[in-house]
Amino acid sequence: MPTCHTAAPTPARKGLFLSIEGIDGAGKSSHLATIAQALEAAGHTVVLTREPGGTPLAEKIRALLLHEGMDARCEALLAFAARRQHLLETIVPALEQGHTVVSDRFTDATFAYQGAGRGVDWVALEWLEQWVQTTPAADSPHFQSPDCTLWFDLPPAIAAERLQKARTPDRFEAQTLAFFTNVAAGYARRAQQAPERFCRIDAHQPIAQVATQVRQCLAQRGYLSGPTTPPVYA
Ligand SMILES: Nc1ncnc2c1ncn2[C@@H]1O[C@H](COP(=O)(O)OP(=O)(O)OP(=O)(O)O)[C@@H](O)[C@H]1O
Ligand SMILES: Cc1cn([C@H]2C[C@H](O)[C@@H](COP(=O)(O)O)O2)c(=O)[nH]c1=O
């Protein structure tokens, strides 16, 4: 069974925002299409996106992050720069139209990889999170954050084994087991800080059982009963 709370009240916006997280090789990408299909079958209009990336500019930043050597704070700043553009250009407009946004990674990845992995100051990241994710709105600025995060939790040694069989590693995938142990601890810390947002998937299971947990999590949150609509007052 996944460890998942029931849905928390969502802020005043029309769409639903989901993020998918986990260390490299945890199995996120293998489930993206089925997540989108399950939501669409329940009536959601799904916008599938990813981080770093999701806009032409943010995709250019992604290429830098994945392939150019750089300082750890530079990595964190680039991740947030890409995120700002992604939010303004892709995520917020989609949410305002009532779409369901599913992002393969979001800010938890910056805390896990740059914070816990590279040692960038956690409090500095929290400040950046607030600054970057606050977007203008007609009434008052909105803090944009996922309503729910599906966290694929897998022991780093197993993830490394899976990746070894799968592909040529990028700059992050090529990191040591010790690095990924820290990244995994970073995800656990974020989950502990926001237990109502996180849904932990035990990714150390055969793929079909992982898919079942994902479905259970979406159902438990009420997302498979259709898109949530704002209440209408007479
Ligand atoms: N439950 C599973 N059991 C065994 N192998 C799996 C499982 N899920 C995924 N895999 C395999 O592990 C490899 C990594 O999976 P996948 O690409 O989905 O991970 P990922 O979390 O998206 O990685 P990355 O973040 O690096 O893109 C793939 O070869 C995939 O087929
Ligand atoms: C958002 C974000 C990502 N990363 C890292 C994590 C992964 O190693 C890559 C993205 O590759 P994927 O195959 O699409 O998972 O980028 C990061 O270090 N910091 C971030 O904020």
Image (cartoon, grey):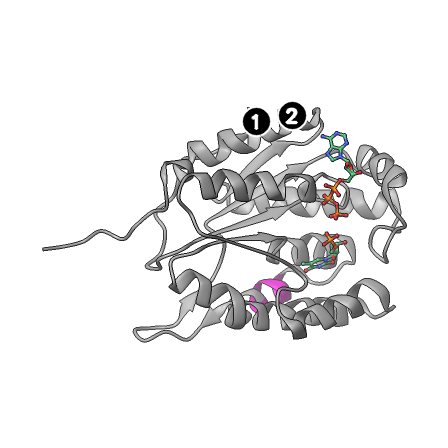
Q: Amino acid at mark 1?
A: Thr
State the quadrant of the N terminus: top right
Quadrant of ligand 2: it is bottom right
* Residue located beneath label 1 in the image: 212
Assess mark 2: CB under 8 A from ligand 1? no
> x%, y% of residue 182?
77, 46
Q: Which mark is residue 208?
A: 2
Up/down of 95 relative to 212, above or below: below
Nearer-the-camera pick, 97 or 183: 97
Secondary structure of the residue carrying tag 2 is: helix
Give the residue displayed 42% in from the left and 61% down from the top. Answer: 95
Residue 39 seen in the figure: yes
Q: Quadrant of residue 70?
A: bottom right
Magenta extent: 123-128
Residue 125 within the magenta-colored segment of the rendering: yes
Nearer-the-camera pick, 69 or 183: 69
Secondary structure of the residue carrying tag 1 is: helix
In-image side of 62 versus 209 (left or right): right
